[in-house]
Image (cartoon, coloured by chain):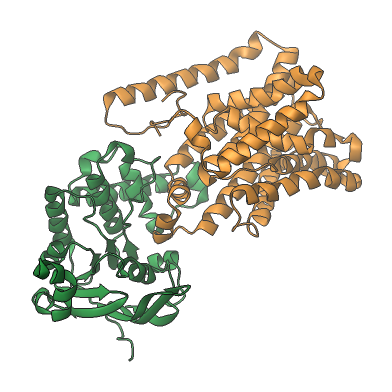
C-alpha cells in the first residue's frame, strides 16, 4: 500500500501487511496531530488557505466516492457544493441560525437533491451520466442569479455567525473544517467494510453477480449518488463557513470540472492524505494560475476530456498504481 | 400442463429466441428438493440460456416458471435472489478489490439488517451483525476447504479456489435453491473431487440443487436425476442409468466415439 488508507485494517493475517497498516495509521495520526498543532506556529493567510483546503478536500472526497463506489464520473458536483454553501448562508440570513443548524440541513438537502437527480438517471452510466451532471453545473449560475431574492444574486451573501462563541474566526474555520474532514475520512473507512460498501463495490465490479445476490443496479446507482451528493453538500457548507462568503463566482461550470480534476489528482482515493492533496490542488492551483489567464480553461478542458474518456472506458484505474492492500 | 404446485423449481414450456435464432424450444424441467439434478448437453445446446431463464437474467418468450408454488414470471435476478434462489457464474464473478472473505460476505447482503447510519458510524448492533456474518462466511469457506485463503485477494488465488469460493458465496446465504453453472470448469482432478464431496455434503432434504455441466462423468457420479439438452430441446431425462441407456443421448454424446 503506497498511500495507506485511514484505518483500513485488512485483517491480512500476514504480519508484514499488518505492520504496514500500523505504520500507515501511525503516519496518519502524526499528520492529524501536526495539522492540529499548526495554528500555534502559523496564522493569517496560511490558516485561511488551509481551512479552504480542508473544505475542498471534502468536496474532492464526494467526487472520489462516486468514482470508487459507483464507477461514475460527475462534472456537476459543484451544484451540490453550492447547495450546501447557500443553505448555510440563507439559513443565517433568514433565520439567524449558525451552522450548528444549517450543516445537518445542508447534508439533508444534498441527499434529497442527489436522490431527485439520481432516480430518473438511474439507468444512465459512463459518459451519459457525466453529461447529465454537466447540465446541473451549467444550470447552476443561472439558478443562483435568477433567485436573487434568496441568493443575493451576483453579490452573494456573507456568512458571519460563529459556531463556538469566544474563539477567533480564523481558528474556528480551521478547526471545524479539520475535525469534519477527519470524521468524514473515518466514516468512509468504516463504510468500506460495511455491508452497503461491499455491495456497492460488487455491483460495480460484477453487476450481474451482484444482481444474483439481490443487489440491483438501480439501487447501487441511486444510493451512491445520493451519498456522494450529501457529502458534496456538507463540503459546500464548510466552504461557505471557511470563506465567510458565497457568491456565483465560486460556483461556475468550471468548479465542477475542477472538483473532478482534484479527485483524479488524488487518484480517487478516500484517505485523508489523498483528500488533502486533492483539496490543496484545487485550492492553490487557481491562486497560482491566476496569472496564466487564458490557459486555465484549456488546462481544465484537457483534463476533462482525458478523465471522461478514460473513466468511460473503465480504463482509468489501469493507469494508476494498483493498490493491492484494499 | 399445469405447473406442479409447491414442489421445487419448475419451468414449463420455456421458449427463447434471439432474433431469428431459436435457442430454447418448449423446454420443461422440475427441480425437486433433496435431489441433486444435473443438466447436460453439448456446447451450444442452450444450457446456459436455460440457466439464465431460471435465474431471471433472460425471460423466455413463452413458458412459465415457479418456485415452491410462487410464480417467478417477470421477476429479475435480484427478486429471485430474494426468493432464496442463488447461482454461481461460469465466468468467475469475483470483485478484485475485495478479499475472498468479503466476496463471500456480499452473498449475505440480503440477510443483513444494518441501516445506512451504521454503514458510516460503528454501532454495537452493526458490530455484532458483522461478526455473525463473518462467522457464517468463514463457515461456508471452511465447508469447501478454502478457509485459509479467506484474507487473500482473488488475483492472488488459483481459479480452482475461486470456483469453490463462488459456491461458498452461494451457500453462505443458506438459500433454498442453488444453481451452479459449470462449477467444475477450470478445476483439476483433485479439486473436482473436493467439489463433488462438498456438494454431496451440503445437500439437504429441502434444498433444490442444479448442476449444469458438460462433463458427463461428473454429472453421472454426482446427480440423481439428469436432464439432457440438445439444440434447445430437452431430449431425455431420468436417472443416470436411464440416461446412459437412452438412445438419443448415446447418439448425441457417444455417437462420434462409436464411429471411431
Q: Quadrant of the N terminus of chain A?
A: top left
Residue B178, quarter of the rendered image: bottom left
What residue do we see at 66% from left, 40% from top? A232
Is B10 located above or below residue B136 in the figure?
Answer: below
Is A23 located above or below residue B117 in the figure?
Answer: above
Q: Quadrant of the C terminus of chain A?
A: top left
Q: Return the residue found at the far top.
A: A41
Q: Colour of chain A?
A: orange
Answer left or right for A315 relative to B230: right
Query: In the rendered image, is residue B53 in sight?
Result: yes
Q: Position of residue A216 (x, y in %)?
A: 48, 59
Is A323 located above or below residue B33 in the figure?
Answer: above
Answer left or right for B192 relative to B230: left
Is B239 located above or below residue A105 in the figure?
Answer: below
Q: Return the residue found at the far bottom.
A: B1
What residue do we see at 32% from left, 25% from top? A17
Q: Colour of chain B?
A: green
What residue do we see at 31% from left, 66% from top? B44
Answer left or right for B256 relative to B172: left
Q: Position of residue A95 (x, y in %)?
A: 82, 44
Q: Position of residue A183 (x, y in %)?
A: 55, 32
What residue do we see at 53% from left, 44% from top? A71
Q: Position of residue A207 (x, y in %)?
A: 45, 54
Label tally: 0
B250 or A79, which lies in front? B250
Query: In the rendered image, is residue B153 in sight?
Result: no
Amino acid at each position: 500500500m503506497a498511500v495507506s488508507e485511514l484505518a483500513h485494517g485488512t485483517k491480512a493475517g500476514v504480519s508484514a501487511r499488518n505492520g504496514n497498516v500500523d505504520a500507515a495509521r501511525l503516519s496518519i495520526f502524526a499528520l492529524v496531530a501536526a495539522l492540529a498543532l499548526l495554528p500555534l506556529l502559523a496564522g493569517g493567510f496560511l490558516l485561511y488557505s488551509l481551512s479552504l483546503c480542508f473544505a475542498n478536500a471534502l468536496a474532492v472526497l464526494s467526487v472520489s466516492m462516486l468514482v470508487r463506489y459507483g464507477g461514475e464520473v460527475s462534472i456537476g458536483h459543484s451544484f451540490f457544493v453550492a447547495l450546501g454553501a447557500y443553505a448555510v448562508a440563507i439559513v443565517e440570513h433568514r433565520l439567524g441560525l449558525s451552522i450548528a443548524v444549517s450543516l445537518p440541513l445542508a447534508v439533508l438537502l444534498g441527499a434529497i437533491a442527489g436522490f431527485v437527480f439520481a432516480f430518473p438517471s438511474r439507468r444512465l452510466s459512463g459518459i451519459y451520466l457525466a453529461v447529465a451532471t454537466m447540465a446541473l453545473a451549467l444550470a447552476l449560475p443561472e439558478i443562483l442569479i435568477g433567485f436573487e431574492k434568496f441568493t443575493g444574486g451576483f453579490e452573494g451573501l456573507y456568512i458571519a455567525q460563529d459556531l463556538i462563541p469566544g474563539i477567533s474566526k480564523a481558528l474556528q474555520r480551521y478547526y471545524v473544517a479539520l475535525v469534519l474532514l477527519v470524521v468524514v475520512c473515518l466514516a468512509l473507512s468504516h463504510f468500506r467494510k460495511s455491508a452497503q460498501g461491499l455491495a456497492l463495490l460488487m455491483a460495480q465490479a460484477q453487476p450481474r453477480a451482484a444482481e444474483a445476490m439481490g443487489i440491483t443496479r438501480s439501487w447501487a446507482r441511486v444510493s451512491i449518488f445520493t451519498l456522494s451528493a450529501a457529502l458534496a453538500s456538507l463540503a459546500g457548507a464548510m466552504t461557505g463557513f471557511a470563506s465567510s462568503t458565497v457568491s456565483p463566482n465560486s460556483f461556475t461550470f468550471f468548479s465542477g470540472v475542477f472538483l473532478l480534476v482534484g479527485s483524479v489528482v488524488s487518484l480517487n482515493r478516500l484517505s485523508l492524505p489523498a483528500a488533502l492533496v486533492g483539496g490543496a490542488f484545487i485550492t492553490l492551483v487557481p491562486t497560482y494560475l491566476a496569472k496564466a489567464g487564458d490557459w486555465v480553461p484549456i488546462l481544465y478542458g484537457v483534463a476533462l476530456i482525458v478523465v471522461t474518456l478514460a473513466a468511460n472506458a473503465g480504463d482509468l484505474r489501469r493507469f494508476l498504481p494498483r493498490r493491492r492492500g484494499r | 400442463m399445469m405447473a406442479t404446485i409447491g414442489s421445487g423449481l419448475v419451468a414449463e414450456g420455456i421458449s427463447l429466441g434471439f432474433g431469428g435464432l431459436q435457442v430454447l424450444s418448449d423446454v420443461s424441467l422440475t427441480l425437486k428438493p433433496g435431489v441433486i439434478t444435473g443438466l447436460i448437453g453439448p456446447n451450444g445446446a442452450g444450457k446456459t440460456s436455460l440457466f439464465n431463464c431460471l435465474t431471471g437474467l433472460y425471460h423466455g418468450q413463452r413458458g412459465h416458471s415457479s418456485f415452491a408454488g410462487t410464480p417467478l414470471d417477470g421477476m429479475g435476478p435480484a427478486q429471485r435472489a430474494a426468493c432464496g434462489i442463488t447461482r454461481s457464474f461460469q465466468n468467475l464473478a469475483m470483485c478484485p478489490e475485495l478479499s475472498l472473505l468479503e466476496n463471500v460476505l456480499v452473498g449475505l447482503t440480503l440477510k443483513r439488517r444494518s441501516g445506512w447510519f451504521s454503514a458510516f458510524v460503528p454501532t454495537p448492533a452493526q458490530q455484532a451483525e458483522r461478526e455473525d456474518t463473518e462467522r457464517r462466511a468463514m463457515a461456508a469457506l471452511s465447508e469447501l476447504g478454502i478457509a485459509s485463503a479467506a484474507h487473500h485477494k482473488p488475483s492472488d488465488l488459483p481459479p480452482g479456489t475461486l470456483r469453490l469460493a463462488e459456491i461458498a458465496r452461494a451457500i453462505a446465504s443458506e438459500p433454498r435453491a442453488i444453481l451452479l453453472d459449470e462449477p467444475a470448469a477450470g478445476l483439476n482432478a483433485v479439486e473436482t473431487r473436493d467439489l463433488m464431496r462438498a456438494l454431496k455434503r451440503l445437500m439437504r432434504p429441502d434444498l433444490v440443487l442444479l448442476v449444469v455441466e458438460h462433463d458427463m462423468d461428473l454429472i453421472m457420479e454426482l446427480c440423481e436425476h439428469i436432464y439432457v439438452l440438445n439444440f434447445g430441446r430437452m431430449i431425455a431425462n431420468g436417472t443416470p442409468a436411464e440416461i446412459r441407456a437412452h438412445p438419443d443421448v448415446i447418439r448425441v454424446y457417444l455417437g462420434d466415439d462409436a464411429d471411431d
